[in-house]
Image: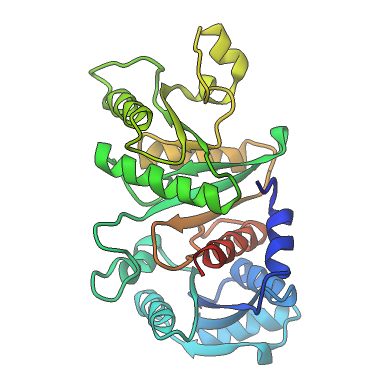
Amino acid sequence: MYKNFQEIEKRIVAAREPYIIALAGSHDEDALVSVAHARKKGIIRAILIGKEEETRSILRSIGEDENHYEFFHEENEGMAAKKACQLVAQKKAQIPMKGLMATASFLRPILDKEEGFIPPKGLISQATVYEYRKENRLLLISDCAINIAPNYEEKLKIIQNAVRLGQQLGNPCPRVAVIAPVEVVNPNIQSTVDAAMLCRAGQRGQIKNCVIDGPLGLDNAISAESAKHKGIVSDVAGRPDILIMPDLGAGNILTKSLVYFGDNSPSSGTITGTTVGVVMTSRSDTAENKYNSILVAVLQSLSEA
């Protein structure tokens, strides 16, 4: 299993011809820095869709040759996202990437029932891949940006999507912790009920290729000492590969807390459950983390090729 983004980069650089990314909302310095870095590594080529003159100006300011890129001028962010997805559908690009625009604008064409990238009866979800330096490994957190208040069936699909990503990261059977405010089932807290049902479904083989436990509090999911102190005996508690959050609010706050209160460990944002790799990061993400998101999306694409 890959332990960090450097190992993913090494795998991708040696893999094949560069992937073509369609960057929607290209007039963003951090996004362009990440794209330029990936281009210099031989990982991608890029089509830039956004405010063209502003995009060109940023490229010049970071010392990047404009002649390496193809441009489409588009000031409307919704139309820029649509153009990026059209280029992917037409096989002129392989990966759409979110630049300077709202998440809703970027997702709209991806979710389109006729022209989007969701398989029948599928559900897309977001996953954050976090470089957990304390234990020298990668940790997945889902869903932090798309599904607002998922029910049991939706959480089941979120787990399946996250497990697939875990496998693409080299882990054939990830350990999945279903997070709730407490580690006991409380009928008044729906997330604990959902977690218990998901755990039982995993035990019966209804959710495959993973080991699931829940409900688990964040403390005893992450800390073996905390789990031991609370008398929790589990194959997952204290050593999870995937954290399934109870709702978008909890996931979003957790991942942003890791960035702003943590040790500034690298991370990436990606979409799972789509038929193509997708780079979806927050507008406030650093250029480094946007580059990491490119790495993960290319790895997903390689795995599906």
The mark total stands at: 0
Outermost residue toward the bottom? 67
Within the image, what quadrant is residue 27 found in? Answer: bottom right
Identify the residue at image location x=46%, y=37%: 210
Quadrant housing residue 168: bottom right
Q: In the image, is 130 to the left or to the right of 107?
A: right
Q: Position of residue 47 (x, y in %)?
A: 54, 83
Q: Nearer the viewer, residue 64 or 231?
A: 231
Observer-nearest of 130 and 257: 130
Q: Name the residue nearer the viewer: 77 or 218.
A: 218
- Residue 189 lies left or right of residue 87; in this view the side is left
What's the image's color scheme?
Answer: rainbow
Please name the residue shown 56% across and 7% down the image. Answer: 229
* Position of residue 95 measured from the top left corner of the image (x, y, whole percent): 50, 73
x%, y% of residue 172? 55, 44
Q: On screen, 124 above or below 244?
A: below
Give residue 189's position: percent from left, percent from top.
Answer: 28, 22
Rendered view: 227 above or below 191:
above
Is residue 100 shown above or below 91? above
Residue ranking furthest to the front: 205
Image: 253 above or below 17: above
- Could you say which quadrant of the image residue 36 lies in? bottom right
Residue drawn at 42 percent across, 82 percent down: 75
